[in-house]
Amino acid sequence: MYKIPANTLFIGKQLVFVPECHSTNTLALQMTQNKSATEGTVVITNNQTAGRGQRGTSWESDAGMNLTFSIILMPGFLAPKDQYYLTIFTSLALRDYLEGKIHPGVTIKWPNDILVHEKKICGILIENQVQGSHFIATVIGIGLNINQTRFAKDTATSLKLITNREIALEQALHELLGYVEARYIQLRQGKWSDLREEYLSHLYWRKERHRFSSGLTNFEGVIKGVDDSGKLIVETSEGLSYFGNKEITFIQ
Ligand code: BTN
């Protein structure tokens, strides 16, 4: 499985397939450390047994049903302070791919959950290797639910649940890598404000009034956007507040 290199310029030309592993992100990080990866190397498995998610959570995926893979990039053109653009371009690429299959209803829940009709279809875990003021490498881990139809949480969904069709995983990977490469090239070309605007335009709950919690407090607010460091900007009765990744929960 996953033997054919992607039909791209560089992402997925080196494809490392392991039938089973704990986490493709962990494997990819090891490869960047021992210098066995080139830019665009993709590490993919059929059975990820200890998948890692954001905020220290785990990522569950039934063997052989979904895409679980990591892309190694070396964005030397990006300063570590601008790392949020990695989240932006990756979320947009996933959204591009899904929008071709499902329309409308694909949104990006800040910072980088991809939702379809309000259910999570894809999770992204980006882990950076930075030295001083330079990027050595970044590992972009993607878990995209394709053919699995039963989930432990009813907030999860898959392409099959939505379209009622089975999709070949290798084909899905190739298509998706094409979108990732196109968005990464856009970033490399410096089209940051275009990427940012597009990302904001697809943000879940943007400009709507909803309930959130932060620490022990529940409050109502309206998502206004995201600042340069990636913090979520929410307008509440007390004015604008800025939240980092672990500092806010969406309620309803
Ligand atoms: C999230 O919490 O939403 C992020 C989930 C990211 C899961 C992917 S699956 C491939 C890669 N390897 C991991 O261990 N995690 C990421």
Image (cartoon, rainbow, N blue to C red):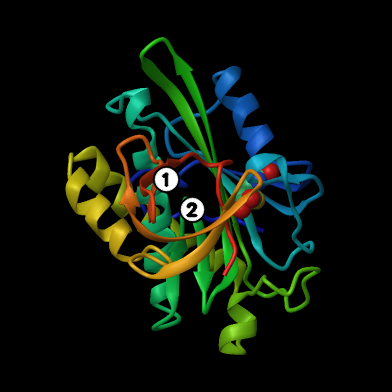
Lateral position of residue 244 relative to residue 68, left or right = left
Disc 2 Cβ-to-ligand 1 distance below 8 Å: yes
Residue 75 in sight: yes
Residue found at x 78% / y 76% = 150
Q: Which mark is residue 112?
A: 2
Q: Quadrant of residue 147?
A: bottom right
Q: Between 30 and 106, which is closer to the camera in this rendering?
A: 106
Q: Where residue 181 sits in the image (x, y, percent)?
A: 35, 50
Mark 1 residue element: helix
The residues bearing labels 2 and 1 have C-alpha atoms spaced at a distance of: 6 Å
Numbered circles on residues, count: 2
Residue 3 in sight: no
Q: Where residue 230 sits in the image (x, y, percent)?
A: 39, 40
Q: Which residue is mark 1?
A: 87
Q: Between 245 and 46, which is closer to the camera in this rendering?
A: 245
Q: Quadrant of residue 7?
A: bottom left
Q: Between 145 and 243, which is closer to the camera in this rendering?
A: 243
Residue found at x 33% / y 67% = 207
Quarter of the image where the N terminus is located: bottom right
What's the residue type where badge 1 is placed? Answer: Thr
Looking at the image, the residue that sits furthest to the bottom is: 164
Residue found at x 36% / y 34% = 229
Position of residue 150 relative to residue 110, above or below, is below
Q: Give the mark nearer the N terminus: 2 vs 1.
A: 1
Mark 1, Cα crowd under 10 Å, few <14 / some 14-19 / many 20+, is some
Q: Where residue 132 sits in the image (x, y, percent)?
A: 41, 10
Residue found at x 63% / y 43% = 215
For the residues bearing labels 2 and 1, Cβ distance under 8 angstroms: yes
Q: Between 77 and 38, which is closer to the camera in this rendering?
A: 77
Quarter of the image where the C terminus is located: bottom right
